[in-house]
Image (cartoon, rainbow, N blue to C red):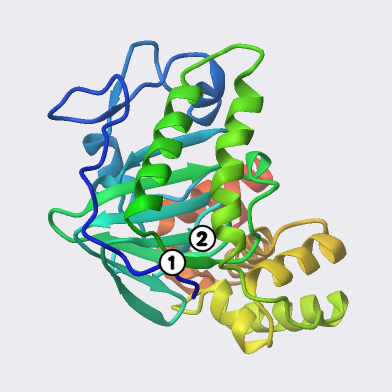
Amino acid sequence: MSRMNSPAPPPSLPAIKGAPATTEVWPVPNRGIAARFDPSAEGGDSLPLASPMAPVAQRPVERRRGLRVMPLGAFLWGGPGGEARAREDHVLVWCHSGAGDLHLGRNAERLGPGALRWLPAGTAFAWRPAAGADGRVLLLSPDLARELPDTPAAATVDEVDSGILAATLAGLAAEARRDDAAQARAVACHLGLIAVRLARAVPAPAQAQPARPLVEALLERLRENPGGPISLADHAAALGTDLARLDRACREIRGQSALELMQEVRREKALTALRTGRRSLDRIAADAGFSGAAHLARAITAATGRLPQAFQTR
């Protein structure tokens, strides 16, 4: 972990321009980067953060394009029991004041004032802010993050950098509401400032492993244990690599991410159980690593266009 000097008592965090003084909101107009991030959003000037964030930790994340900046205390992530789960977007967590608990793989960490964590897409983690935690969370789709690190990074933001980071994130939120020819360049400039800070915290790359044996070893592990508490980050560590390199190997050999490969293995196991057994959908879902019968049904229907019952032996 790199440090940007010792953290001092942080200044008051500037509110994102356009938000009320008492309740911060995220504008989602039907245009620009913000609209591409959440294409289901209806017209209107703003969407309150607190109410839609509550169920996020308990539903699968779909791939979305764009960016979103939100208060640290409004962001929750992880399974119902607090277990780590992967996301398909990048996440930047900045704890300006207060605290929160970050679970990354098998490691648990209490983040305090000044903590900055970068969690690339596919990283399995859980986050629970403590009461009164203040800061920002940036959610960023992979297509906008080409200059940012592809491995998790940690840093400490001091009093001076705190003001710069707050202004950078506020600028990103403002640019996401724009829809003009300069928007993409402006967003890239703001993300470049974040990339510089994170680049100083990224560890030196380990010696690369051959891609095919790595993917074959991952497939073997996934087929032995498609569900349970073992995350992709845990699989990567057991294979002597990190999640970013494992993901690159899967894309090179299989043309899909490590997360997509894991989902494919789970669907295969579920389909085999549906065709050959008489167990309940809840039991099949649990054995294949799904959170429940509804999650299983969505995955099977999305992949095949048919409900799980259509594959069951009569």
Q: Residues within 10 Å of mark 2 (few under 14, many from 20)?
A: many
Of badges 1 and 2, nearer the viewer stands 2
- For the residues labelled 1 and 2, say whether their Cβ atoms are less than 8 Å apart: yes
Q: Residue at label 1?
A: 125
Q: Is residue 228 above or below residue 18?
A: below
Q: Is residue 36 above or below residue 1?
A: above
Residue at horizontal 39%, vertical 59%? 157
* Residue 79 can be seen in this image: no
Tag count in the figure?
A: 2
Q: Is residue 2 above or below residue 118?
A: below
| SS at mark 1 in the image | strand
* Separation of residues labelled 1 and 2 (CA atoms): 8 Å
Which mark is drawn over residue 227?
Answer: none
| SS at mark 2 in the image | strand
Residue at horizontal 60%, vertical 53%? 196
Between residues 201 and 277, which one lies in front from this camera angle? 201
Please give left or right for residue 254 compared with residue 227 in the image.
right
Q: Position of residue 64 (x, y in %)?
A: 56, 37
**Residue type beneath disc 2:** Leu
Q: Position of residue 195 (x, y in %)?
A: 60, 51
Q: Position of residue 18 (x, y in %)?
A: 29, 19
Q: Position of residue 170 (x, y in %)?
A: 39, 33
